[in-house]
Amino acid sequence: MRFVSLLLTLCICWKQATAAYNCTACDKRKCPQYLTPCTGHRTLDPCGCGCSQCAKQKWERCGGPDWDYGYCDSGTKCVNLTGLQLVEIPDIGVCKELPGYNKLLNYFEDDDENCPEVSGCYRVMGTCDCPTKRSCIDDFSLQSYDPLYCDPQYDSPAYDHLFVYKCTQRGCDLVDDECVCSSSGCDRTYQFPDLRTCYNIKMERQCANVTCPEEKSPICPKDSVLTRSYTPYGSCCPTLPSYCTCNFQQCDNSCPQGKRVVIIQKGDGKPGSCCNTHLCVL
């Protein structure tokens, strides 16, 4: 009886350990802080909590618990550091191109089934197309249909009087070592044009006398590149160093015209063996 009880306990523990990770309930988490303007697009929260971040760019870290390390911009996927699979949170991955996934989807196509359903409009050929799709990338030109911008009949100087151009100045000031951003009329002046610039100056001052541990970057094989190190918001030193990860763009599985590819050994997604080994035969 004791053996059966022990076996049942082990089974329960194994099931819990192998169960898929679920995002933390929205009322028990805080949205990660991020800087504007974004290098690429903004991203919506795959966990559905309404959080917004700047999309991570190629070779930046991504994933983590509740996607706190970020979600990748269009054209890249959050991939395991080593291997050929998409990352599954709470694991941390890297944004890069992965063989088998479209680099450039059409604007109206779904991007990720784990993302919320969103709607918006793209200005295409002088008019607007307003699809609904599942995507975490906020790349819409407009959040909803606006005849003034979407109807071709208004696209002429005769209708310029319908457009209201209000002079608005946006910027940030460093107040008590914190960046305070706002908007006002154009007669207002700010210390910094945006939050990112203000934050960078603040961190330069804050970290001036901080010595970070020396990071010894590894030398990567020819089929790999270094990821970017990761420094948390408000910190001076990286918490995730640079690692070697496969650059699948370096893999060439093509053969001259008239010859066919014969795979000898498949790549496993690990630096040094990222690409398939193949022969070109008649």
Image (tube, grey):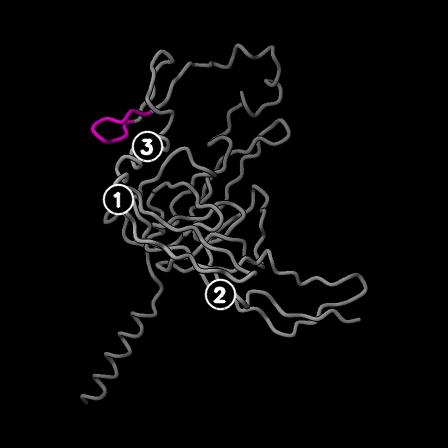
Q: Name the magenta segment's main secondary structure.
A: strand
Asked if the stretch drawn in magenta spans residue 33, the answer is no
Q: What's the magenta region?
A: 172-180
For marks 3 and 1, give the CA distance: 15 Å
Q: Contact (CB < 8 A) between labels 3 and 2?
A: no
Q: Position of residue 165 (x, y in %)?
A: 46, 14
> Mark 2 is on which residue type?
Gly
Up the image or down, 194 lies above or below 119; here it is above
- Badge nearest the viewer, 2 or 1: 1
Give the labeled residue for mark 2. Answer: 83
Which residue is denoted by mark 3 in the rendering? 201
Picture residue at 66% right of the left edge, 72% below the top: 263
**Element at label 2:** loop
For label 3, the crowd category at 10 Å Cα-Cα, with few meaning under 14, some 14 to 19 and many 20 or more, is some
Percent position of residue 244, x then y: 46, 59
Q: Earlier in the sequence, mark 3 or mark 1?
A: 3
Question: Which residue in the rendered view is the most extreme toward the left?
Answer: 2
Q: CA distance from mark 2 to mark 1?
A: 36 Å
Residue 176 on the magenta span = yes
Could you tell me the amino acid type at mark 1? Val
The foreground one among 151 and 46 is 46
Q: On the image, numbered disc 1 is attached to which residue?
A: 210
Other residues around mark 1 within 10 Å, as few (<14) / some (14–19) / many (≥20): few
Taking the image as shown, residue 189 lies to the left or right of residue 159, namely: left
Number of the front mark, 3 or 1: 1
